Amino acid sequence: MTPTMANPTPAVSPAFRDGDEVVLAEGTYQGTPGVFLRFKEDANWADITERSGDVRSHPVAWLAHNGAGLPSFPAHLAN
């Protein structure tokens, strides 16, 4: 019998929960703050609500809890 991956687990498994304040710690939009919404069907991806109100998907590996030892970004520089 071949195993299937019905619910893959995230490559990085931080304890993100609905409503957590997050920041993109890596990637093109590094420093963008947002609010964690949910994991996607592929649990390596998640939706966050950005300050503009837009909901966007990002790799979970790029997310960090806001204030998790990351430098602060002035509001006028954040998306």
Image (cartoon, helix red, strand yellow):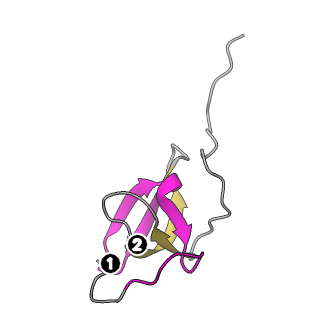
Instruction: Using the numbered discs, state the Cα–Cα distance from disc 1 to disc 2 in whole angstroms.
Output: 6 Å
Label 2 neighbour load within 10 Å: few <14, some 14-19, many 20+? some
Q: Amino acid at mark 1?
A: Gly
Please state if 64 lies on the left or on the right of 55 as rendered.
right
Label 1 neighbour load within 10 Å: few <14, some 14-19, many 20+? few
State the image coordinates of residue 52 (x, y, percent, origin top left).
Answer: 29, 80
Mark drawn on residue 49? 2
- Magenta range is 46-73
Residue under the point 62% across and 30% down: 5
Q: In the structure shown, which secondary structural element does the residue marked by tag 1 occupy?
A: loop
State yes or no: residue 13 in magenta. no
* Screen quadrant of the N terminus: top right
Mark drawn on residue 30? none
State the image coordinates of residue 23 (x, y, percent, origin top left).
Answer: 46, 72
Residue at the spot of label 1:
53
Q: Do the numbered discs 1 and 2 sit on residues whose CB atoms are within 8 Å? A: yes
State the image coordinates of residue 46 (x, y, percent, origin top left).
Answer: 48, 57
Q: Compared to 36, does 62 lie above or below?
A: above
Q: Compared to 48, does 72 lie above or below?
A: below
Q: Amino acid at mark 2?
A: Thr
Residue under the point 31% across and 59% down: 28
State yes or no: residue 59 in magenta. yes
Residue under the point 64% across and 43% down: 9
* Screen quadrant of the C terminus: bottom left
